[in-house]
Amino acid sequence: MVKIKEIDSIKSDKLDMKTIINKIKEILNSGYQEEAIVVKDNNVIKKHEIYWALKYLGTKFIAVSNEEENVKVSLDFLGFYDEVSDPGIRVYNNTIELIERDRPTPLVKLNGIINDKKIGIWAKLEWYNPFSLSIKDRTAWYIIYNNLDKLSDKEKIFEATSANTGIAIAAISSILGKKTRVFMPETSPDYASKLLKIYGSDVVREGNTTNELIEKVKIYAEKENAFVPNQFSNIFNLLVHLRYTAKEIDYQTIYGKLKLNGIFASMGTGGHIAGLTFYFHNKNKAVKIFGIQPEENGTIPGIKKQDFKNWWNINDSPDDIYSVSLEESIDVLITTARTNGILPGISGGAVLAGLKKAYNNGDLDEGDYVCIIPDNGIKYLDEIYNERVL
């Protein structure tokens, strides 16, 4: 006999992540749980892959039975959107709940970016995350949350970062009573070092890119028994955006009655755009994903070109890529400030510049487009002023 139970009341042995990813893809494509998991005393004994797929998709409920049975229970019925719906009065017992429960981040319509009333431009404001005031809070929290067992015998967390992820890790680590050492390239903004030190983190600055620091972090961590989140290849970097960022956009655009045609996102580690790509290419193929990268020989803080060979091991990639310059990015973020009263960070400016380029190329159909704004421009005032004489 099939019953619907809260998924948190059920326990299951771990599975390899590739099996889970394949099952997530299958469930997103169908929109249903099509087999009951077999349980005994609230422990899964068969269909572990379904349990973990639904767990990482964030459903509140799961269909269970004491024997193998076919079912057809929709994701909606299983509470798929519950964790990203209206948070209500927003009173929380501790600061970790700000990242766990204060969902979704705002989605706001922007004016003045392009002159076409048939195209709606919507900004997903990720600076509403509490610790680094950026989208990287999601990554830092989810990697740490899903590795608490590995952290139990470690006092330190080491990570390579350009800024925001390290700040988020330092903040969360301070709550958990862990020490952090953050390795940043010399090119990272000065505010990051100051903020990290306020959080109690050790800061090491050397090299020109985070790529130069990744192996060094691993060597130091092994010597000092430290945990390394390694945002650059940790699958939870993708899964957090699959479970939350993408689902929030899906929920907000459905209930906001938008005609969602596409999502524009910058590419740094690639985690959030990979999560968006995986989610929408399987759940709603009508939504196109557009990646933003720096132009040839150009640099933009926080974003870089991607190697799509074995990209996050999802056998997928964005539908199109647009290259923009630092100057274009800053021009459009200043336009946004002067027409909408909010100042995106430079990578957010790059995303809006990419959308503008797509529009000028004639690549956008009538409808709505979401732009992921990773953080706020107040962090980059010196860079903005140095690039543009205002």
Image (cartoon, rainbow, N blue to C red):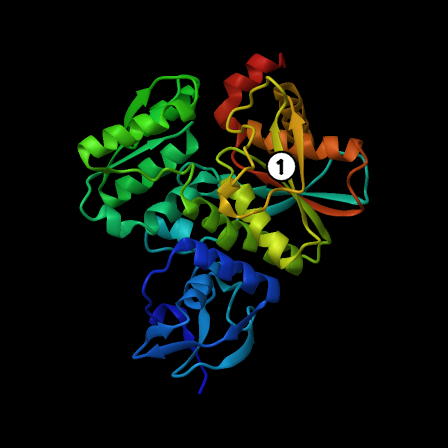
Residue occupying the far front of the picture: 309
Residue type at numbered disc 1: Gly
User: Is 101 on the left or on the right of 349, as rendered?
Assistant: left
Asked whether the viewer can see residue 89, the reply is no
What residue is shown at x 26% (from left), y 29% (from top)?
219
Across and down, in percent, residue 20 comes to: 44, 59
Q: Secondary structure at mark 1?
A: strand
Across and down, in percent, residue 62 comes to: 45, 73
What residue is shown at x 50% (from left), y 62% (from top)?
23
User: Is 115 on the left or on the right of 374, as rendered?
Assistant: right
The image shows a total of numbered marks equal to 1
Across and down, in percent, residue 270 comes to: 51, 38
Residue occupying the far bottom of the picture: 1
Q: Say which of 192 and 301 sits in front.
A: 301
Across and down, in percent, residue 163 comes to: 41, 28
What residue is shown at x 39% (from left), y 25% (from top)?
192
Asked whether the viewer can see residue 247, the reply is yes
Near mark 1 (Cα within 10 A), the count class, few <14, some 14-19 or many ≥20, is many
Q: Quadrant of residue 19?
A: bottom left
In the rendered view, tell whether residue 273 sits above or below residue 378.
below
Task: Identify the residue position indicated by label 1 in the image.
Answer: 291
Q: Quadrant of residue 357?
A: top right
The N terminus lies in quadrant:
bottom left
The C terminus lies in quadrant:
top right
Q: Say which of 98 and 153 sits in front.
A: 153
Q: Say which of 82 and 161 sits in front.
A: 161
In the rendered view, tell whether residue 15 sits above or below residue 322.
below
